[in-house]
Amino acid sequence: MTDLDQTKYHPMVGVPIETLKPKKVRKNIDLTLWERLYIFEILRGLYVTTKHFTSNMIGFVVAPKGKKRSIFTVYYPEEKVTLPPAYRGRPVLVMREDGTEKCVACGLCEKICPAFAISIVAGERANADRYPISYMLDMSRCVYCGYCEEVCPKEAIVMSSEYEGLAERDRSNLRYPKEKLLRSEESVKDRIEYIRRIYSKCNY
Amino acid sequence: MLADLIESIAKIVFIFSVNLGFFAPVLGWVERKQSALMQDRIGANRADIAGFTAIGLFHSLADAIKVLTKEDFVPSGANKFFHTIAPFLSLVPAIVTFAVIPFGGHYKLFGHDVHLVIADLDVGILFIFAFASLATYGVVLGGWSSNSNWSFLGGLRASAQMLSYEVAMGLTIIGVIMVFGSLKLTDIGAMQVNFFRWGIFLQPLGFILFFTCAIAENKRAPFDVPEAESELVAGYFTEYSGLKFVMFWMGEFLEIVTIGAIVTTLFFGAWHLPFVSDRMLLSFFQFAGPNGANMLAMLVNIATFFAKVVFFIWLQMAIRWTLPRFRYDQVMKLCWKMILPLSLINITITGLVLLLWKK
């Protein structure tokens, strides 16, 4: 026999089936007689909903104070939620203080982008620094995955917390040029700190 | 003669304005707001007139304007005649049933006997059932004539469900009729002066069964299989828009009011306050003179009646927003295997007790 004899070698994966005790499965979940009478279960359900109703009704007349607010609805255009740094809004390019972008046009984000939303034309400054001559981000393609941010070695593209103003009547307006993407480093500070932690970019 | 005419017209105008002018629009708001409060939401509050929202009440007005300006759409291949007539058949019975429901006793105003019921029929409760079963035609015709699969399925379900519960509902009410010995709703109301002679104490099982059947007859959750939103888009009125849609919608809301009124009349002492008889009420208002006392007693009785109705509307809304929808076979099983035998048992026990009581 060859080494391929299956009887000799048993790879152990999980628990052997012999050691498993058959579990009793309740296929027909029988209700007790009390539950099948149904009327008392209805009353129990009505008690729960009525409790909510009355407490909210009292809160409706007498406004509850502080954190004891039971209704958490946010009146959207007037009120806005404070988004956590983990929120992935639209991607933005980080700007240095002198107004130039951090991006060095390495093309990694262009490569990783699963939706082919980014297209970069690289160029070189007089002091031999690389920079993107044009950085086009097609927001109609972007899927907000955040891979560009993860792959970026220069923390030059990050997912901001912006989620408004992304609707257009003309699709061609959704191709965002570099000027539309630039944001100051200050405005995305929280996110940069977050990605340093989450992607272990602290040693860059 | 002229006084009778004025009285009748006044009563009709009153019932119409209360039902169509108050309950129909306000219930739309109540349903939104109550469901919101029960689910820890806020509910409709955006429609405003000059920044004044009136806790969302203007949504009814906005809906009315929207509906009036909508296209009256008839799908291609639909039977236009039946498609048009179905909403009427659904709405009219809901309004007509109020003709026999007493919303107060009888009073002597300026030497004239005022009975607070539009038509004091001897067969009051049968009249209500007869007209309530006409509403089935509206639903079935609306479902069938729309030339849509969703509507058709909804109509089929509605016909089976409504006919089944019609039978059961008729039987659940017989206990009450046996106890009070009358089909006349004014008589039944007048007999419940004593608090412990209210229908709920004489027929507790009858009340539960009747209330269940009534909700099923109105096709509201947990019995909303004919219009099940998650399965049939909107069921039998999928293809309706504009005012026709609103007629179905109003018919449903007016039936809520009707059910509340019937339950109040049959089981919860109609227009009587607990422990307060009509004579006590009149002597309490003695200071206002005979006419004034009658007037005040009438107002108190009407207010009592409608307070009870409002409570039952609230209860129906609470049930609608508490319970999930039954499966279709469960709906049928509940009707034919639970409610029908139980109502027959109820009739038997009531009959035996009445027989032994009288001996």
Image: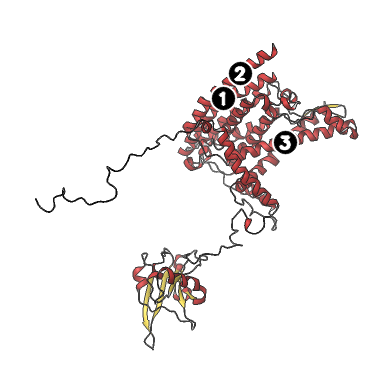
Disc 1 and disc 2: Cα gap in Å?
Answer: 17 Å
Disc 3 and disc 2: Cα gap in Å?
Answer: 32 Å
The residue that disc 3 covers is: B306
Residue B276 position by quadrant: top right
Q: Which mark is residue B322?
A: none
Three-letter code, disc 1: Ala
- Residue B262 screen position, x and y as percent: 67, 30
Q: Chain of mark 3?
A: B
Q: Residue furthest front?
A: A19
- Residue A176 screen position, x and y as percent: 45, 71
The residue that disc 2 covers is: B349
Is residue B337 depicted above or below A185 in this figure? above
SS state under label 3: helix
- Residue B178 screen position, x and y as percent: 66, 19
Q: Is residue A97 left or right of residue A26?
A: right
Q: Tell me whether marks 1 and 2 sit on the same chain.
A: yes
Is residue B19 depicted above or below B63 in this figure? above
Three-letter code, disc 2: Ile
Q: Chain of mark 1?
A: B
Q: Are marks 3 and 1 in contact (CB under 8 Å)?
A: no
N-term mark: 3 or 1: 1
Is residue B123 depicted above or below A64 in this figure? above
Q: Are marks 1 and 2 in contact (CB under 8 Å)?
A: no
Number of numbered discs visible in the structure rendering: 3
The residue that disc 1 covers is: B168
Q: Tell me whether marks 3 and 1 sit on the same chain.
A: yes
Q: Residue furthest left?
A: A1
N-term mark: 3 or 2: 3
Q: Residue furthest top?
A: B359
Three-letter code, disc 3: Phe
Observer-side mark, 1 or 2, equals 2
SS state under label 2: helix
